[in-house]
Amino acid sequence: MKLTDEVFIAAPREDVYAALNDVEVLKDCIPGCEELVRHSDTELEAKVLLKVGPVKARFSGTVTLIPEEPPRRFTLAGSGSGGTAGFAKGGADVVLQEQDGGTCLTYEAHADIGGKLAQLGSRLVQGTAKKLSARFFKAFAVRVTTCETALVPGQATSANGG
C-alpha cells in the first residue's frame, strides 16, 4: 500500500521540522496514540489504539527517524504489532520546502500489513490509512501554527491589517 500527499503548513520550515521531532506534538496529533516514548534522537516507541473496519486493536511498535538533510528532508521507518489483529511495517520519505510564507510538506509512505488487517481488503485499509493521515496532518498543522502565533505576539493581528 502506498500513500502520497502534500500539505501546506503556515509556519517556517525549521519550526515544522522541530515539531516533527517533538514527542509531545506527535503524541497529541497521532490518532489513537496512547503513549510515545523517545529512546534516542532517532528511536521512538509507540502504543496506538486503532479501529480499521470491524478490527479494533492496540498496536505497539517502533519508529526510526533517519535525518538525511535536516530540516529539508528525512525518512522514517517503523513496524508494529497488534497481536491477533495483525502487523504493519513501512516507512515514509518526507520533504519540507519553504513556500509562500510557510512550508509545503510532501510525503510518500508505504506499508505492508498482515494478519486480520490484510484480510479486510486493500480498499478499506487504504481508505482508513488516508483518513488517519488526514486527521494527523490537520491536527499537526493546527498545533504548529498555534505554537507559531503564540511565539510571536500580535502576528495574527498584524497579518489581518490591524
Image (tube, rainbow, N blue to C red):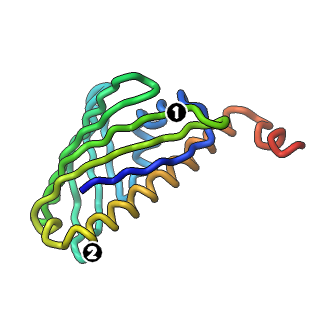
* Secondary structure of the residue carrying numbered label 1: strand
Residue at 53%, 40% in the rendered image = 104
Instruction: Decide: few, some or many residues near mark 2? Use Cα within 10 Å; few <14, some 14-19, many ≥20.
Output: few
* Image quadrant occupied by the N terminus: bottom left
Q: Which residue is mark 2?
A: 53
Please determine whether, in this image, residue 133 is positioned above or below residue 144.
below
Residue 124: x, y in percent? Answer: 27, 71
Q: Nearer the viewer, residue 141 or 124?
A: 124
Task: Determine which quarter of the picture holds residue 160.
Answer: top right
Q: Horizontally, is 22 left or right of 77 in the view?
A: right
Residue at 76% over, 35% down: 153
Q: Amino acid at mark 2?
A: Gly
Q: CA distance from mark 1 to mark 2?
A: 35 Å
Mark nearer the N terminus (1 vs 2): 2
Q: Give the residue pinned by disc 1.
A: 97
Residue 149, which numbered label? Answer: none
**Seen from this angle, which residue lies furthest bottom?**
54
Confirm or deny contact between disc 1 and disc 2 (CB under 8 A): no
Q: Is residue 155 left or right of residue 17?
A: right
Q: Residue at x 80, y 37 (%)?
A: 154
Q: Give amino acid for label 1.
A: Gln
Would you place residue 100 above or below residue 47 in this image?
A: above
Q: Residue furthest right?
A: 162
Crowd rating for badge 1 (residues with CA inside 10 Å; few <14, some 14–19, many 20+)? some
Q: Position of residue 68 (x, y in %)?
A: 34, 24
- Quadrant of the drawing holding the C terminus: top right
